[in-house]
Structures are given as structure tokens and as C-alpha cells.
Amino acid sequence: MLPKFLESLGDNLAKEWVAKVLTPACIFWFGGLLAWGWRFGFKQLEQVLTQKSAALPIAQLIAGLLVVAVSAIALRQFELPVLRLLEGYWPRWMQPLRRWFVKRQVTLKDRAEKRFQGLAAKGLEQLTPDETDEYVRLDWQLKQTPTQSDRLMPTRLGNILRAAERRPLEKYGLEAVVCFPRLWLLLPNEVKTELTEARTQLNTMVRVWIWSVLFLVWGIWAWWAIPVGIVSAWFAHCWMLDAAVIYGDLLESVFDLYRTALYKSLRWKLPTNPTEEQRMGQALTDYLWRGFTEPEPTFENL
């Protein structure tokens, strides 16, 4: 029976508690409880939960919710470091391993480019349906890979995000790391919302991956925790890659559609053709990064 103090909560607060329960942190601890029961038996747990005294179950419920909430908050502090590790930003002592993985990525990229060029040389009209599918797949794969081999990351996730970061530079001469924080302030609210939701989805998948890896610890009590953790981590990683692709596409689209707002807000003349835009984009990036003291360029009148 639901305790009286929970019945007195408002609808919004109750919904918030339900949202807290339905998190990877709650699943992790509930899995640990099942693993403990698997190892030591559920008899003692059943006795505690079926006691006639209402005070003890309420205290246990509160303690459990606190453990879930505190552990979820604590783990969020590790999301960005773990994401960077999954991208391939590894510590110095892992550099030999990183170089090996980067070399492997270079081999895969060269192989994909060679096959893609071979299919393109045949002519799209001459390709069989299977070759057409392969051509599209390779084109999509190469789009999610940095064009320069010396910019490759050791992991697929890292290459997806780095390729997205470098596309504004390759297309418009604008360095995303430098220009995007300024451009963000000029974006419409609905665009910010879409981009924030995409980034939140990526962070959520990182969070699920972390909890899935941690779930392996329950293998000390129940053998099934290990395959459950491995399968969950694998799915989380696949979803992470999909979320990274969506986030990267939206990031590129922001520069495609709103880069002129950056020029206008800084009172720079708008480029008139792609060649000029490459040159001016690089100059604008340098201006934002270090500033100029020369009389050029001349600012436009508002």
C-alpha cells in the first residue's frame, strides 16, 4: 500500500519522483538488489518488506531514493570526461595505444576512399543496385570522417564529432571551436532548443553507457549481470553514435543557415562568393581568437 506521505504529494512532485525512479541509476541499484537476492536469497528481503510496521519501509524507501538521486548527480560529473575518453582524448601513457588505433582508422579511411572512387569512376548509371547501396553507404561513412588523415581520432565516435567540428572550417573558413560560442548567442530560441536536445540525447547515451559498464560489478553476486551489462553498453554505444551524427548534422546546419548573422553582428562585410568566404572566414576566426590592430577590414555601418 502506498504510504500516506506519498499520497499527500502534489501531482507535479509525484511525477518528478517517478522520473527520478525511471533513470539508469535506479535500474543500476535495482539490478544490484536483484543480484544480491540471487546470491543470498530473497527471504530476508521479503521479511523486511512485509513487516507490519510502516516506519521501517518508509525509511528504507527514502534512503533508497536518496541513494539513487545522489549517485545519479555524482555520476553526471563524469559524463564529459568519459565522453572525451570515448572520443579518443586519452592520457599520455595511452599514446602508443592511441597511435595504433589512429593508424587503423587511417587504413579504414583509405580503403573506403579507394572503393568509393572506384565506384564513382564507373558512373552512377552503370552501378548495380548493390553497388549503388554501397556507394551511398561509403559516401555517408566518409562524410562522418575527417578529410585529413592527420586529424583522425582513434574511435568512430571521435571521428564523427571531429568531422562535424571541421566541416564549417572546410566549407566557410570558420573554426567551430572559436566561432560557435559567439554564434550561439545569435541563434533563435527554437534553434537553441533543437541543438540542446540533440546534445542532451548524446549525454544521456553516455550516461547509460557508464551505468551499463558499472552494472558489471554485480557479476560478483549474479552471473547474468555481466551479459546484461555488456549488451546494455553495446546498445548505448550504438545509440551514442546515432546521437552524435544528429548533433553533428545540426551543428553543421547552424553554420549553413546562420553564419551571416555572425558577420553582421561584428559589422563585417558579407562575402560575395565561396572563394572570398573561405578567406574572410579564416580572417574572422583569427579576429575572434586574437583580435586585429590593423586598419583592415573596415567595419560596416549599422
Image (cartoon, helix red, strand yellow):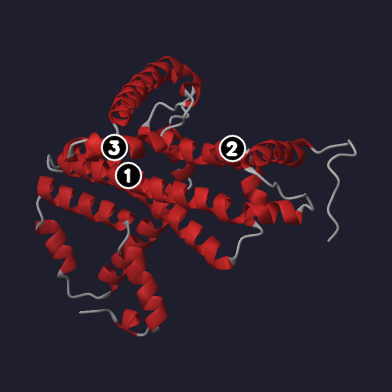
Instruction: Check disc 3 and report its element: helix, strand or loop.
Output: helix
Mark 1 or mark 3, earlier in chain: 3
Q: Quadrant of the C terminus?
A: bottom right
Q: Position of residue 164 (x, y in %)?
A: 48, 41
- Which one is in front, 190 or 234? 190
- Structural distance between the alpha carbons of marks 1 and 2: 31 Å
Q: Position of residue 255 (x, y in %)?
A: 57, 50
Residue at image location 23% in from the left, 56% down from the top: 30
Residue at image location 46% in from the left, 22% down from the top: 149
- Structural distance between the alpha carbons of marks 2 and 3: 29 Å
- Residue carrying label 2: 169
Query: Which residue is at the far right?
Result: 295
- Residue carrying label 3: 124
Residue at image location 63% in from the left, 51% down from the top: 259
Q: Position of residue 113 (x, y in %)?
A: 35, 26
- Residue carrying label 1: 209
The reply to whether discs 1 and 3 touch (Cβ–Cβ < 8 Å) is no
